[in-house]
Image: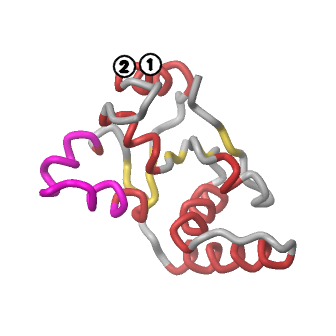
């Protein structure tokens, strides 16, 4: 599965109503195929810490997927598709959605409304 930044915040223990233990239990119960984050998620998450080492403690659960030319093209496609329907998504969310869609993996997020209208993307909520 591909994880959004808000799930990493839960792993960190800073998601109101969803503890670190809840997040780890959710991963163990729901994800048997590998835990991945797009590089933009790692950037967003690590940017909230004073040092990379502080954030890396929480990132060790995940494999970071690169933002390569294929992901960038897919992200532009996501933005265009949504614009045609009168919707919009920011660059970071388009990269997250594009990574999940390109790899054919479900996206785990608490921001379902940001991603639900992206065609071909399976979105999974994690909050109770």
**35 relative to 67, above or below:** above
Q: Which mark is residue 58?
A: none
Instruction: Name the secondary structure under disc 1.
Output: helix
**Nearer to me, 69 or 87:** 87
What is the CA distance from the residue labelled 1 to the residue labelled 2?
6 Å
Magenta stretch, main secondary structure, is helix
**46 relative to 57, above or below:** below
**21 relative to 4, above or below:** above
Q: Are marks 1 and 2 in contact (CB under 8 Å)?
A: yes
Q: Which residue is rendered at x = 68% and y = 44% of the image?
A: 123
Q: Which residue is rendered at x = 55% and y = 74% of the image?
A: 91
Q: Is residue 47 magenta?
A: yes
Q: Which mark is residue 25?
A: 1
**Nearer to me, 78 or 70:** 78
Whether residue 96 sits left or right of residue 51 in the image: it is: right
**Looking at the rendering, which quadrant does residue 99 occupy?**
bottom right
Residue density around tag 1, few if under 14, some if 14–19, many if 20 or more, within 10 Å: few
Whole-percent x and y of residue 63? 37, 49
Colour option used: secondary structure
Instruction: Name the secondary structure under disc 2.
Output: helix
Q: Which mark is residue 21?
A: 2
Image quarter in which the N terminus is found: top right
Whether residue 54 sits left or right of residue 17 in the image: it is: left
**Looking at the rendering, which quadrant does residue 23 occupy?**
top left
Region of the chain picked out in magenta, as a range:
43-58
Point out the frontmost of discs 1 and 2.
2
């Amino acid at each position: 599965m591909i994880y959004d930044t808000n799930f990493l915040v839960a792993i960190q223990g800073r998601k109101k109503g969803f503890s670190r233990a809840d997040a780890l239990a959710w991963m163990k119960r729901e994800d048997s195929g590998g835990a991945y984050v797009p590089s933009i998620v790692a950037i967003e998450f690590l940017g909230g810490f004073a040092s990379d080492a502080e954030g890396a403690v929480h990132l060790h659960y995940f494999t970071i997927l690169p933002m390569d030319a294929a992901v960038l093209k897919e992200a532009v496609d996501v933005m265009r598709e949504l614009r045609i329907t009168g919707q919009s998504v920011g660059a970071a969310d388009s990269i997250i959605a594009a990574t999940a869609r390109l790899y054919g993996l479900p996206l785990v997020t608490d921001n379902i409304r940001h991603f639900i209208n992206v065609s071909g993307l399976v979105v999974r909520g994690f909050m109770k």
